Image (cartoon, rainbow, N blue to C red):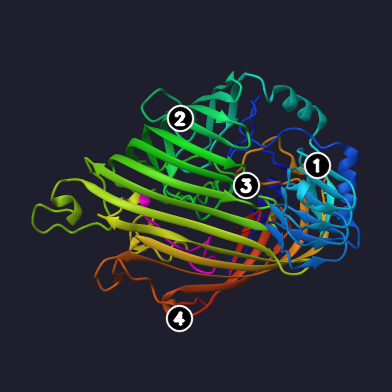
Amino acid sequence: MRKASIATLAACLLVLVAASAAAQSGGYTIHVSPGQGPDPRQLPRDVADEVIRFFNAPGTIHFSGITRVPAARGIDGDVAILGGPVTVAGRISGSLHVINGDLILEPGAVIGGDILVVGGNIEGQSQVSVAGEVRSYRDVLRYRRAGDDLVYAPQRESLTRWRRHRADESTSSFVLSLGGTYNRIEGVPIVFGPRLNVRLNEGTRFLGDARLIMRTGENFSLDKGRFGYRASGEIVIGSRQSNVGVGVKTFDLVTSVEPWPLRDFEAGWASFLLHNDYRDWYRRQGWGMYAALRPSRQTTLLLEGADELDLSSVTNDPWTLFNRSRTWRDNPAVTDGRFRSLTASLHVDTRNDRTRPSSGIYLQAEFEAGQGRNITGPVGQPIVCITTPCGPPSLLDDGMLTYQRAWLDARTYLRVTPAGRLNLRLAGGGKVGGDDLPNQRRVSLGFPDPLPGYRFRQLSCGGEALPGQPALCDRAVVAQAELRTHLGFDFGPDWANDWGDDSADEQWQPLHVSGPDIVVFADAGYAWSVGNGPTQLPAGKLPALRNWLPDIGLGLDLGPLGVYVAKSVGAQSRDDLTFTVRLGRRF
């Protein structure tokens, strides 16, 4: 059994006081202009108190997320709905409060009391019967959960005034931050440079951002590779809630091969504190153009074309807090070459809380068509060359690599009892056509996520026998389920979950402890190569369920920290248990 040492637990406590931001994606930032975030206005305090009293009242009936009351149905009593959109075609005998969501009233709907909507709009009011008063506020209610109740958690007043003043003005700023994931190639990337948010006319803005990246894992010099950069410019037409954007970008970045299992800040803290880098890295130099359609805050459609040079990176020796005498795992080589790609992606996020969701869905879908030229790096497992020419069959004809890849990450969050939540996730994808995938597009499965009951990259399609244990599978699929019960403990100041950042990314909140949640979970997944070999599967076939690797586990989630014990089960199960510490929720 992997046991947590005193040093490991001490490291976790250091995370709580946040003495260093070296491993967290984003880090501390000096003077950042507001971006494309939610409306910065703040709901009047008396209205916020009214909504919270109504929601917390013992007789109020609660719903979360997308809700519909059909024409043939009725609800007796007061109703509070967190999130939305909410559609009412039937009857509600009491009052209705919708929190941070839109309300759609269909003809024939009957409301026996008042209607109050905060953080949303009301549609169809003239077509229904409402016995009481109707009010709506576009300002969202800022809150945190205390068990099943809501607690008012406003933004700090100085920050609110600053955002309100600057939200509609042209701004410029200079950013200095720890921007990126701590890793064995770069150490902590320090980024600095200007940012622009220029109002061109009513409804049109220019967003510009240029950053120089100092890679502290290498010697400080002006040699090639010691510095990177990223710069972008985007024209945005529309409001902050709904808009269209067209932009161009250029970059020289160190990027992870598999960014999906652990969150960025978790991977970074594991490297900085414990000398465990669970990702592999490579360098990207090039440029791209993109167009984004954002019909709402919850949905983004993106089409992006890029032309870039991908290069393998060697392991450096950045400083870590513990285990400094250990040697870093080798950073495996990628498929070096120049790549052109066209990527279409869809992002939908209706979760009521991105850090601790209890309702809603999350969907990330991506399709990439790419072509590689001037390939010099490895493709798949090393080939023993007996006669020349020697290389992957896909490169022998024209020296080019053409591939198509797809990926899907779908999650849903369901409330099954007043204190119980059922969270489900299905993720996977990989090669869907063309030649062999370049190594930087390949996948694996194993410890610490999403199969914590198994070894690191236990499913890597031969990568476990090579230096650095590279991920070499063409495809992977994983299903995860967890049932969590909240025990009602909540500790931390009201401002603890306001970090002055309205971005859509999940954030880690070390100063606010909520829980504990008792978590029972199960995972199962499989990764494989496409082909007709003895250990491969044909392109049109999925692995049989009997081949999947399952595990089960139990955890205690305290909010900023979760501790989990997992056990592999099935034909390839291991005898020992595995112990993991996670920052925030598993997914």
Give amino acid for label 1. Answer: Ser
In space, the residues marked 1 and 3 are separated at their CA atoms by 28 Å
Q: Mark 2 = which residue?
A: 247
Q: Mark 1 = which residue?
A: 136
Q: Residue at x 47, y 62 (%)?
A: 456
* Eye-nearest disc, 4 or 2: 2
Give amino acid for label 3. Answer: Glu
Give the magenta range. 441-455
Q: Is disc 3 placed on a helix, strand or loop?
A: loop
Mark 2 or mark 1: whose residue is earlier in sequence: 1
Q: Residue at x 14, y 57 (%)?
A: 385
367 sits left or right of 13 in the view: left
* Eye-nearest disc, 2 or 1: 1
Q: Which x, y percent locates residue 490?
A: 82, 55
Q: Quadrant of the C terminus?
A: bottom right
* Eye-nearest disc, 1 or 4: 1
From where the camera sits, is residue 142 visible?
Answer: yes
Q: Mark 4 = which residue?
A: 571
In space, the residues marked 2 and 3 are separated at their CA atoms by 24 Å
Q: Mark 3 = which residue?
A: 506
Q: Residues within 10 Å of mark 3 (few under 14, many from 20)?
A: some
Give amino acid for label 4. Answer: Ala
Mark 4 vs 2: CB contact within 8 A: no
Name of the residue lying farthest toward the left: 387
Give amino acid for label 2. Answer: Gly
Is 445 situated above or below 276? Answer: below
